Image: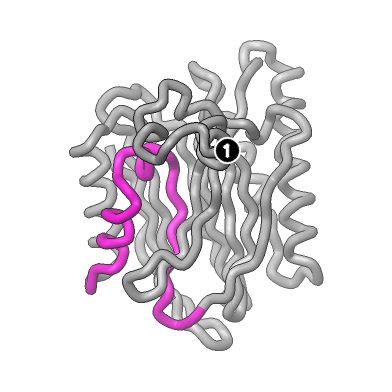
């Protein structure tokens, strides 16, 4: 089953932005534990976020919803965007732990969480886990977040190759999650130009579709609705075992 957010246009101080999101449960999972957010603000800033919950039963989706709701409190009139994002991430971590204390059936739940505030030619991002943010310019990948995972650590150490990482038995183990206590987010700032494309995705997409194909599809001369559909369909054709979510912003 697909869930869509209709594309919208926002004209900021310098950039015109079109946004779209799509999520599918996949062929194996009974529930979709992914959650996403597109928040459009009065000053034409846009906040995008994606979360991939874990913990089994209903716990994963509960954790993802808590995290998205808390990060969605971001305000575009803040003096320090990075500080605000870090504070909200810390609060989301505590919120999930508190929910577990109230209901022990939810013990072990947590979530990835990646968000970016697009404001006046800049993208202020924060990231925990192995959901990702991609920054595309033209037909090139300018930058992407680095997974907080065991496999990524092994890659960084040179212990395994990229090909080995794809089939590694521990490829789904993450080092950090929101709700695991004292999470350590990574954060930064992007310079955004007209024509750039920002994508957030859960691992159901980028574990199933290789980087070259992702960049190729995001570089298509097509509306972002078509790009999102192509990406999700490729993930379903390649695997389809996990929930798949993609959030796009075309500037």
Q: Is residue 224 left or right of residue 39?
A: left
**Residue 244 in view of the camera:** no
Start and end of the magenta stretch? 193-221
Foreground pick, 155 / 3: 155
Q: Residue furthest top?
A: 105
Question: Where's the C terminus, which quadrant?
Answer: bottom left
Per the image, label 1 sits on a secondary structure element best described as helix
Q: Residue furthest front?
A: 158
- Is 216 placed above or below 168 here? below
**Label 1 crowding class (10 Å Cα cut-off): few <14, some 14-19, many 20+?**
few
Residue pictured at 55% horizontal, 67% vertical: 46
Question: Where's the N terminus, which quadrant?
Answer: top left
Which quadrant of the figure has residue 8? bottom left
Q: In x, y percent, where is residue 119?
A: 61, 74
Which quadrant of the figure has residue 55? top right
Magenta stretch: residue 203 in it?
yes
Q: In x, y percent, where is residue 14?
A: 54, 87
Residue pictured at 31% horizontal, 63% vertical: 218
Foreground pick, 1 / 224: 224
Q: Is residue 242 left or right of residue 65?
A: left
Q: Residue furthest left?
A: 237
Foreground pick, 176 / 71: 176
- Is 148 placed above or below 79 here? above
- Residue that numbered label 1 is attached to: 157
Q: In x, y percent, where is residue 213?
A: 27, 54
Magenta stretch: residue 116 in it?
no
Residue pictured at 41% horizontal, 64% vertical: 141
- Is 168 placed above or below 34 here? above
Q: In x, y percent, where is residue 62?
A: 57, 29
Which quadrant of the figure has residue 161? top left
Q: How many marks?
A: 1
């Amino acid at each position: 089953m697909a869930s869509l957010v209709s594309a919208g246009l926002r004209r900021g101080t310098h950039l015109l932005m079109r946004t779209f999101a799509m999520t599918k449960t996949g062929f194996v999972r009974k529930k979709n534990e992914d959650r996403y957010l597109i928040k459009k603000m009065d000053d034409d800033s846009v906040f995008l976020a994606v979360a991939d919950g874990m913990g089994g039963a209903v716990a994963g989706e509960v954790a993802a919803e808590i995290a998205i709701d808390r990060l969605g409190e971001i305000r575009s009139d803040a003096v320090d965007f990075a500080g605000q994002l870090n504070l909200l991430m810390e609060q989301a971590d505590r919120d999930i732990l508190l929910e577990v204390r109230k209901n022990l059936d939810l013990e072990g739940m947590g979530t990835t969480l990646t968000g970016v505030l697009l404001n006046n030619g800049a993208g202020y991002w924060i990231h925990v886990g192995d959901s990702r943010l991609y920054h595309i310019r033209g037909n090139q990948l300018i930058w992407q977040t680095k997974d907080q995972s065991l496999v990524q650590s092994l890659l960084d150490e040179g212990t395994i190759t990229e090909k080995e990482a794809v089939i590694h038995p521990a490829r789904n183990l993450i080092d950090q999650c929101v709700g695991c206590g004292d999470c350590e987010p990574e954060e930064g700032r992007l310079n955004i130009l007209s024509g750039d494309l920002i994508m957030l995705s859960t691992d159901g997409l980028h574990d199933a579709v290789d980087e070259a194909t992702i960049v190729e599809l995001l570089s298509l001369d097509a509306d972002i609705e078509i790009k999102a559909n192509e990406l999700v369909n490729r993930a379903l054709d390649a695997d389809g075992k996990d929930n798949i979510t993609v959030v796009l912003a075309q500037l």
